[in-house]
Amino acid sequence: FAIINDAPHKTGGYCYLDMAKSYDTAITEEDINDNIQQELIPVEFHINNINFNSLGIVVERLEGVLQMPQRKDPLRVDWEDYHGEVVDLMKPVLDVRNIELKCWMKATSQDDLISKWRTLCDILEAPGTFRLQIDAGTKPLLFDVYHPDQLDTTVKWRNTGPYYHRFTLRLREPIPVKRVLRVTGSSCSITLTSKKILEVSWGDNTKTMNVYGTGITLSHNYASSGTYYVLINGNVEEITGFSTDAIVVWNRI
């Protein structure tokens, strides 16, 4: 990006800088690389915009986030007089994504433990999906998931604190493929063309369902200005036209 831009049109521009730093002296490329390696970015977890740290939750193991979901069975044709089979692999589609988080919760008192635990359970028991966000770098990973099973928990009670609660979150993402947008402000506009039905999750617990057609324009206003992440869930690789006033964080993930 240009700090000083002598463009002839003399108009302002916009850009989004993640983890930007400035120095009061010239430094070498080796110094920059050493500085980046020394500043490790901690991994943070959010559930419906609630930081796990505020609930005393620590994630000790994570599975299913970066793994590709299993493919759905493709169309197969078995001809009696041909070797093997004919398999349609032109447009592979994926099954649901399963995510597992092995966690433990720390609290200062029994009342604190029960209060934090009920906050988590209320999110898991609410209708619809909830948002899991993993900040592991400058681009967050986001999933609209639900918890289909009973929580597997172990509580360690003591006469005095601290108190610990060990449990496993087994989450299921019904639509595992998405496009991620970042909105900074109080509104978002999207125009797209898609023959396949899509679902738009606006990042404030609201969704627009059954989105498809040619040149469809969607607009959404937020209750307050801030940073929101919009998920376009579905066969996003088959979107043939797309424009938005938001920032595309992940084109397909």
Image (cartoon, grey):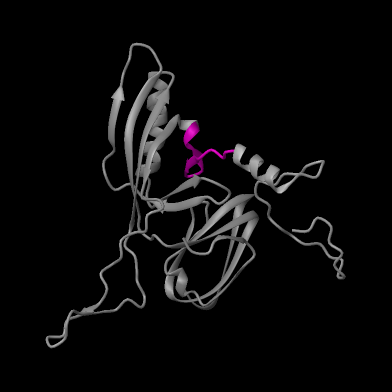
* Position of residue 81 in the picture relative to residue 146 (left or right): left
Q: Is 247 located above or below residue 240 in the figure?
A: above
State the image coordinates of residue 118 (x, y, percent, origin top left). 38, 32
What x and y, as percent, mark residue 183? 61, 56
Q: 219 or 77: which is nearer to us?
A: 77
Say which residue appears at 47% left-offset and 45% top-offset: 48
Q: Position of residue 90 (x, y in %)?
A: 36, 78
Quarter in which the N terminus is drawn? bottom right
The answer to whether residue 240 is left or right of residue 39 is: left
Vertical placement of residue 58 versus 99, above or below: above
Q: For the magenta stretch, what is the residue range? A: 39-53
Total marks placed: 0
User: Residue 65 lies in magenta, yes or no?
Assistant: no
**Residue 209 visible here:** no
The outermost residue toward the left is 80
Q: Residue at x 30, y 65 (%)?
A: 71
Extreme residue toward the bottom, this view: 81
Quadrant for residue 167, please give it.
top left
Q: Nearer the viewer, residue 44 or 55?
A: 44
Of 225 and 46, nearer the camera is 46
Q: Can the viewer see residue 100 in this picture?
A: yes
Q: Residue at x 41, y 36 (%)?
A: 59
Q: Is residue 77 left or right of residue 44?
A: left
Of residues 77 and 208, the one drawn nearer to the viewer in this rendering: 77
Q: Is residue 234 above or below residue 157?
A: below
Residue 202 image offset from top left, x and y in percent: 52, 57
Residue at coordinates 43% horizontally, 32% vertically from top-left? 57
Asked whether residue 49 is drawn in magenta, I would say: yes
